[in-house]
Amino acid sequence: MPELPEVEVVRRGLSTWVAGRRIDRVEVLDPRSVRRHTLGPEDFRGQLEGAVVLGAVRRGKFLWLPLADSVDRVDSPDALPHTALMAHLGMSGQLLVEDPEQPDEKHLKVRLTLSAAPGLPDELRFVDQRIFGGLAVVPLVPTDDGGPGGLGAGRLPLIAADAAHIARDPLDPAFSADELHRRLRARRTSIKRALLDQRLVSGIGNIYADEALWAARLHYARATDTLRRAETRRLVEAVQDVMARALEAGGTSFDSLYVNVNGASGYFDRSLSAYGRAGRACTRCAEEGRTSIMVREPFMNRSSYRCPHCQRTPRNARW
């Protein structure tokens, strides 16, 4: 499944290529890809045709495009959007901006034809081989804290209903490290379990959790109620740093199916320090003149990668 930086790469592409344009035509080539739109493909098409994409917003790995119901309402004082086009990428979903002359992709599921714009392709295509993802028109609801819905929302205190249950992510301008620390201290669990809990902090998957914990020198089983404020801040800074570096590289792709809106794959996996490095030397220990070999350990039916020297098992570990 794409990690947060992959989804942010897609959001930025949609903001550049699609925002401000009208949806002129909608073709649903596989109804399974709009199954989350419970009123069916025809209603999906009817709600989108003629609507204007106001932007591209993301919270965690959830991505949506706020919609104005017509071009006439875009600049209207009461033009607050009420709905959004929600994109669930799932395991293999792709949003591609293409010229109409470009041949259809093998697993093309939905095609949106956009209003003409100089120098920009006119089609937004949803491609999905495994059909775990999909598109739906969903209502926008007020955020629980009165802040912006997510990255890309500006000051708009609205969030797609499908994403309203998750916490803010570390790249969100309204994210608070102090609030996360308060939530962590109130829980009795391990730090990695907490990082993967979307109700506490969203968008951190297995790869970036391992990378951030390695950078912060914290064992994945460290008890959250023992964390000091400085340790939480160090961990948050590590998460933000590793995600920022992944964004510069275009994301982390271990699957050839993941591409951004321009069809380019990510390649940050070449720069990982922890994930997938079992049996290899810890780069930090090597730089500091020590010899320590990274290990892989089972965790929640997945794996955790750590350095036995940098991330020693705590006495109060919670597994």
Image (cartoon, grey):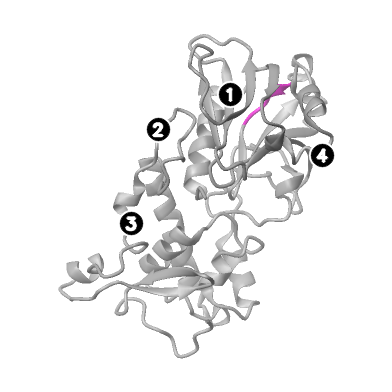
Residue 112: where, in percent of width, then height? 64, 21
Q: Is mark 1 on a helix, strand or loop?
A: strand
Compare marks 2 and 4 and give the one earlier in the sequence.
4
Q: Name the disc covering residue 272, or none.
A: 3
The residue indicated by pointer 2 is: 264
Q: Residue at position x 34%, y 51% from top?
A: 269
The residue indicated by pointer 4 is: 38
Residue 52 among magenta residues: yes
Circles 4 and 3, Cβ within 8 Å, touching? The answer is: no
Which range of residues does the magenta coloring cover? 51-55
Q: Name the disc covering residue 124, or none.
A: 1
Could you tell whether 318 is left or right of 115 in the image? left
- Alpha carbon of mark 1 to alpha carbon of mark 4: how far? 22 Å
Residue 278: where, in percent of width, then height? 31, 68
Question: Around disc 3, counting alpha carbons within 10 Å, would you say few (fewer than 14), some (14 to 19), or many (20 or more)?
Answer: some
Residue 151: where, in percent of width, then height? 59, 42
Residue ranking furthest to the bottom: 315
Judge depth for marks 1 and 3 and give the one in front: 1
Note whether 156 is above or below 167 in the view shown.
above
Specify the amino acid type for callout 2: Ala
Compare marks 4 and 3 and give the one earlier in the sequence.
4
